[in-house]
Image: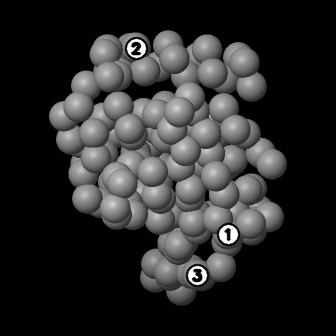
Amino acid sequence: MVNNLSSFESEVKNNYGRSDMDFPKGSIKILDRSIVEILIKNARKSKSVQYKSGDNVYTATFSTFTKLDDDGMVGVYGDVPQDNDDVREITFLVTGFHANWDTEITFSKEYMTAMPERELKHLINFQRAVLATGVL
């Protein structure tokens, strides 16, 4: 995990410079593809999982995922995806971004989208927390 964290920090610096900025963002690049894999593997074990980074604690609860069905339509599913599922998007409800409200976080191929928008530093720190916690 140390190599992933060091390459993650390089990606933060290359893509966003100062990650302590407080300006809100609706979406950012997924800085390490293993973040989505970690979230899915942990969701298979427990629907809600805590991820920690420094003083920040985020609880991610699996919500839904989408995939292209055999009939060519996009299906929305409420069960955690299995290894053979071709996930297009996966959504988690996350606490820890705001003191009073949940944040809906959707991961697609390259981007992580927050609804409502959240501060850049928190979007980056959530990814860092997932990577630091790893697979349970």
Q: Give 61 or 70, whichever is nearer the viewer.
A: 61
Q: Which image quarter holds the N terminus?
A: top right
Pointer 2: residues within 10 angstroms few (<14), some, or many (20+)?
Answer: few
Residue drawn at (42%, 33%), measured in percent from left and top? 124
Residue drawn at (19%, 34%), measured in percent from left and top? 23
Residue 89 visible at all: no
Describe the element under mark 2 as helix, strand or loop.
helix
Find the residue positioned furthest to the bottom: 71
Badge 1 amino acid: Lys
Q: What is the distance, in whole Å, between disc 3 and disc 1 at their CAs? A: 11 Å
Q: Give 122 or 78, whichever is nearer the viewer.
A: 122
Pointer 1: residues within 10 angstroms few (<14), some, or many (20+)?
Answer: some
- Residue 50 horizontal side relative to residue 55, left or right: right
Badge 3 amino acid: Gly
Q: Give 49 or 29, whichever is nearer the viewer.
A: 49
Can you say whether 89 is above or below 96 in the image? below
Q: In the rendered structure, are the residues bearing label 3 and label 2 in contact, judged by CB atoms less than 8 Å apart?
A: no
Q: Position of residue 39 (x, y in %)?
A: 64, 53
Residue drawn at (63%, 21%), measured in percent from left and top? 5
Q: What is the distance, in whole Å, between disc 2 and disc 1 at their CAs? A: 32 Å
Pointer 3: residues within 10 angstroms few (<14), some, or many (20+)?
Answer: few
Badge 1 is on which residue? 47
Display coloring: one colour
Badge 2 amino acid: Lys
Q: Compare marks 2 and 1 and give the one earlier in the sequence.
A: 2
Badge 3 is on which residue? 78
Q: What is the distance, in whole Å, between disc 3 and disc 2 at their CAs? A: 35 Å
Describe the element under mark 1 as helix, strand or loop.
loop
